[in-house]
């Protein structure tokens, strides 16, 4: 069912995946039924899995190296959200009838680039052939000191709410890619598109937030929806001050041209920034952690007793948002 | 894109997957970005991932509980092949436009049944929606004493070759299901079909083979092809005596009716029996391990210097096999 010109399963593994496992202890050259891993002394492992599907989560025509890197990065971002250091990953690749060897080569090159970037190695995987769209499931494993993982369920009333980086770029970038957003200067449009295609997992910040943050997660469904996940897991409410949400110059420009895009920024997905809460006395600790990680962390609101997320405008009045966050279905 | 009657992602997780994670330490109620796990003292973790796709690896109309159990079991079998004890698994489920809530309920019930059977718990997962066929990627994690995992690459000339259980039932069962094999008594046909639909991972045998086996793997691509994998990984050759390969009564009956089916049995996939080698002096240790595990282990051949797998008939002459093992593409 795979393209007849595509090399067979074992050849693909030997050419494009086994090299990614070289030097990875426990990967056993991808020649065994499974891989081996043990946490460093005093650590436990953190495991996450995420699937991305052609023409659902990315466009089939996207450059394969970017597809690979984003597929890996959305998993690395989950590790970052738990305060974990990446160790290894497994990739289950289901090739479609259209998948070419050049595509697999590009996919493998993208993984290689990000392996170096995030110090993560290939531990194992599976290659299959599907009559449907190309599908990638990555399982990423990191480690964190025992008992020190960050959770969604530990926000407390009185906590301050922070986000890293800037919010909304990816949703606006997707709008550009899909032709719903036009009229931006090319440099700004490039920035927004790039933020959609290649998110930056905040691994160093996640590590620096150990012992600082009360609760944390990554923003994948959208800022408002994801803060809602923290609220429901923690049994608390939250208020976001829209005017404090950090925006890139490109996002500000897009919103100035059409203020309705603020809602896109606040509720759109795919930011992969860290969203976290800290006790009220810890602003200086956050500033130190952010400086150490080399990324901005901006206070955007607070945790209160109750339930649900409220977004207030510059005048303090509640903004009525019409869109929820991203759901897979 | 999912069936509009299918509950949303978060509802599906709450109803059908979170209950499977209850009581699993580190699963965190499936409410965090990732799950946590640490090996028991003196152990390391063993990690494997396998994808199954509707109408590729199973029929879309198969009972969903059996689909779930086989998807989990092929992963558990990889753990068994490494001599590992199952601990936890993650499931990435991509529902198709045809997937109903009843299907997900049945799928979840199948996972629950096998969680108890193999003492494995749900650590995490991902649910997405695909326009293609329903796709399941399971990542299973087990543990083994540090340095005691079984490998494919450690067979040595002079080793004896053993397999557990019986060989070829699943390939013949698939022939029945696909209508290529007919004329068997219904009880025997049922046995073969069941062996295809619900393999029995040899976890207890894998555990008992620690310190006994030189090399091991599970038979998923077919006995001849998989012994070939051991040979290429170990840099050795192997001889299988076809007359010693253990066959069920049903398989014997099918082969008596058409001797060409012996080749189907020897080269067909999906047995999920253990294939292992031991030093020549260890027959009694194998017998003890098999008795402890409650499964037969049958000597079928030997490892020699050289490369490749030879199959000999009752007269000692080499059988010419026309089919290789299963490849995903």
Image (tube, coloured by chain):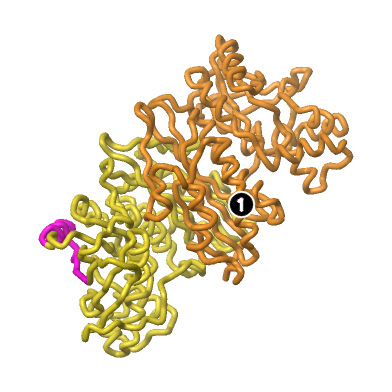
Chain colours: A yellow, B orange
Left/right of residue B223 with respect to residue B34 in the rendered view: right
Camera-nearest residue between B32 and B227? B32
Is A261 located above or below residue A13 in the figure?
below
Residue at the location (24% across, 77% down)?
A: A241
Residue at the location (80% across, 35% down)?
A: B261
Q: Residues within 10 Å of mark 1 (few under 14, many from 20)?
A: many
Residue A221 visible in the current orientation: yes
Indicate the secondary structure of the residue bearing disc 1. Answer: helix
Quadrant location of residue B195?
Answer: top right
Magenta span includes A153:
no
Residue at the location (63% across, 22% down)?
A: B294
Kindly identify which residue carries mark 1. Answer: B107
Residue B182: x %, y % from top left: 86, 42
**Count of numbered marks:** 1
Residue at the location (63% across, 52% down)?
A: B106
Residue A216: x %, y % from top left: 28, 58
Quadrant location of residue B303?
Answer: top right
Magenta span includes A296:
yes
Is B7 located above or below residue B247 in the figure?
below
**Seen from this angle, which residue lies furthest left?**
A284
Quadrant location of residue A255?
Answer: bottom left
Residue B327: x %, y % from top left: 62, 45
**Seen from this angle, which residue lies furthest front?**
A306
Is B83 located above or below residue B193 in the figure?
above
Part of the protein shown in magenta: A284-300
Camera-nearest residue between B215 and B198? B198
Residue B120: x %, y % from top left: 50, 39
Camera-nearest residue between A244 and A194? A244
Residue A13 visible in the current orientation: no
Q: Where's the N terminus of chain B, which quadrant?
A: bottom right
């Amino acid at each position: 069912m795979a393209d007849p010109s595509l090399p067979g399963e074992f050849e693909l593994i030997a050419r494009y995946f086994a090299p990614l496992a070289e030097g990875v202890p426990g990967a056993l050259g991808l020649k065994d039924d499974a891989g081996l891993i043990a946490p460093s002394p005093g650590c436990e492992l953190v495991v996450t899995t995420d699937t991305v599907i052609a023409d659902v989560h990315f466009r089939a025509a996207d450059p394969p190296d970017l597809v690979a890197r984003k597929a890996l990065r959305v998993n690395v971002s989950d590790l970052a959200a738990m305060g974990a250091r990446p160790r290894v990953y497994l990739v289950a690749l289901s090739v479609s009838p259209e998948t070419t060897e050049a595509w697999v080569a590009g996919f493998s090159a993208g993984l290689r680039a990000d392996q170096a970037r995030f110090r993560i190695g290939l531990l194992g995987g599976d290659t299959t052939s599907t009559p449907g769209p190309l599908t990638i499931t990555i399982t990423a494993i990191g480690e964190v000191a025992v008992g020190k993982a960050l959770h969604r369920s530990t926000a407390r009333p009185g906590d301050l709410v922070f986000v890293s980086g800037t919010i909304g770029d990816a949703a606006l970038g997707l709008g550009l890619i899909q032709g719903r957003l036009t009229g931006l200067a090319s440099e700004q449009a490039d920035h927004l598109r790039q933020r959609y295609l290649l998110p930056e997992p905040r691994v160093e910040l996640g590590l620096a937030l150990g012992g600082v943050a009360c609760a944390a997660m990554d923003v994948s469904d959208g800022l408002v929806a994801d803060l809602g996940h923290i609220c429901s897991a923690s049994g608390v409410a939250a208020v976001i001050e829209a005017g404090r949400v950090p925006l890139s110059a490109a996002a500000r420009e897009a919103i100035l041209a059409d203020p309705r895009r603020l809602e896109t920024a606040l509720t759109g997905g795919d930011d992969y920034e860290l969203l976290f809460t800290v006790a009220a006395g810890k602003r200086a600790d956050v500033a130190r952690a952010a400086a150490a990680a080399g990324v901005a962390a901006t206070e955007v609101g607070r945790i209160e007793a109750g339930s649900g997320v409220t977004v207030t405008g510059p005048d303090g009045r509640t903004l009525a948002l019409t869109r929820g966050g991203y759901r897979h279905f």
